[in-house]
Image: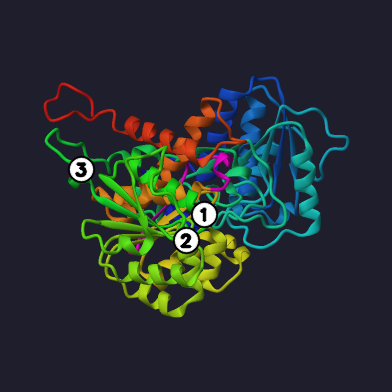
Amino acid sequence: MTAVYHIDQIRTLETLGAEQVSQPLMILAGQAVADWVRSHIPTGNRILCVAGQGNNGGDALVAGRLLQAAGYEVDMVLLGDPAHLPTDAARALQAWQATDRPWLRAMPVPLPGYRLVIDGLFGIGLNRPLDQAWCHVIDTLNKLAAPKLALDIPSGLCARTGTILGNAIMARWTISFIALKPGLLTHEGPDHAGEVIMASLGMDAPMLLPPAGRALHGADVAGLLVPRRRNCHKGLFGSVGVVGGAAGMVGAALLAGRAALKLGAGRVTLGLLDQDAPRVDHLQPEMMLRHAEDLFHLDHLTCLVVGPGLGKSADAVHVLDLALRRPLPLVLDADALNLIADKPDLATQLATRRDVTVLTPHPAEAARMLGCSTAEVQSDRLQAASTLVDHFGADVILKGCGSICMAHDGAWCINTSGNPGLANGGQGDVLAGMAVALLAQGLNGYDAAQLAVYLHGAAADKLVNEGIGPVGLTASEVIDAARAVLRGLAKGWRMETGNRHA
């Protein structure tokens, strides 16, 4: 588990950890940066080190001094009033001055050729939009050809939410001190942080303080999988009903159904609203196709997904109402969420359900359900997911860059898999089908959400690594890739006889 902490928790950890480590945290942070640079950038290269007037600037001053001593040519720029430096940062400036290497109060003009830029302007405490002058500094740094290494957080990026506060450094690498912060993982964070390197500074953060959430990796979800016995049958793996497929949108329901089947559901039945819908899926004839209302006369269903291609007709409202009343685990996606946003009686039904419910909104759908703008949702994605949980008592997947999975009890994680290949039509239908398949096989709502989200992103990563996409990668391709990733996660399984891999 990779722990993620809110900013106030990081401050608590700094206090707790300072009592356990042998040196000031600023010295340890600067040393961690210098060690990383020495292992990645050959000595003798020229480095631009840009420090602000906070503790983040102190980290940069320490790192720059150590790198200068190690044989690099370091240009140190301190922006802001040195008289306002915090105590530890002021000591770091004094130590730099003792090297007899000058420090600059403004960016050098013209800017020489640098092999690396170290960004120590603003740290995790930044919570206000930057003024025009600071935005210009960041713009100047971003235009340099040299790669950027950000200390703790790229300057200008909100460590709490991942939003850009006016302008933000585009880093190739970010060294995150002590623990991960949410803003590195979601919204604009991944694009600006680049590769995130952890520097614990000698602390075991989870031993000192329980984390707020976690970053979701394959190792975190592999333990959710249960090996299958040889003596099994389809009835043990659930019977999924997919409700949707209005005229012109049957493909969405087909994608969800195919994903559910290939992610392990025992059987899958589609309930389609289009009266002229096909009676068989020739690409996946294992699925059964019926009219939507007929699905609710079946007594073998063990879970439902409603929304792929549902539309917003009176018939769509009717079948959604039937689904909300059905005492089965339920995944709600796409127009099922839009209808709940539009119809207060449906929203009340959802909020009073006692059975497992997983909601899978993208930011615009979340905004409709919360009665706010998409920009408001994106400005604090964790808070938006939490509010959805509070309103509806469901497990939630808030999709997007760094999809957030939040349990109905408030536990949360931010997914780390995936790439821009998922930014096209049908991917949400596939994700919903994957989630319902995992519910059908006995996972609870939060675990099904975590595993589905990770597999969905990891499948896209697998395809890109194989030369497929990201441009032009399709939802259909993701389904088979997700099945392969699932098998990879389960590679340690053995059948009960022990003579064959599961």
Q: How many marks?
A: 3
Q: Badge 2, how many Cα within 10 Å: few under 14, some, many 20+?
A: many
- Which disc is residue 304 wearing? none
Is residue 414 part of the magenta span, yes or no? yes
246 sits to left or right of 101: left
Q: Which residue lies furthest to the bottom in this view?
A: 345
User: Compared with residue 465, is residue 150 higher up or lower down, i.e. above or below?
Assistant: below
Q: What element carries label 1?
A: loop
Q: What element carries label 3?
A: helix
The residue that appears at 57% across and 35% down in the rendered structure is: 33
Quick one: 411 or 56, which is closer to the camera?
A: 411
* Residue 253 appears in the figure: yes
Q: Give the range drawn in magenta.
A: 407-425
**Residue position marked by numbered label 2 in the rendering:** 310
* Sequence-first tag of 3 and 2: 3
Tag 2: residue type? Leu
Could you say where residue 76 lies in the image, as x and y percent from the top left? Answer: 73, 37
Disc 2 and disc 1 in contact, CB within 8 angstroms: yes
Instruction: Please identify the quarter of the rendering in which residue 49 is found.
Output: top right
Which quadrant would the N terminus be assigned to in this image? top left
Q: What element carries label 2?
A: loop
Is residue 11 part of the magenta span, yes or no? no
Tag 1: residue type? Met
**Residue position marked by numbered label 3 in the rendering:** 234
Tag 3: residue type? Lys
Disc 3 and disc 2 in contact, CB within 8 angstroms: no
- Which disc is residue 249 wearing? 1
The residue that appears at 68% across and 42% down in the rendered structure is: 170
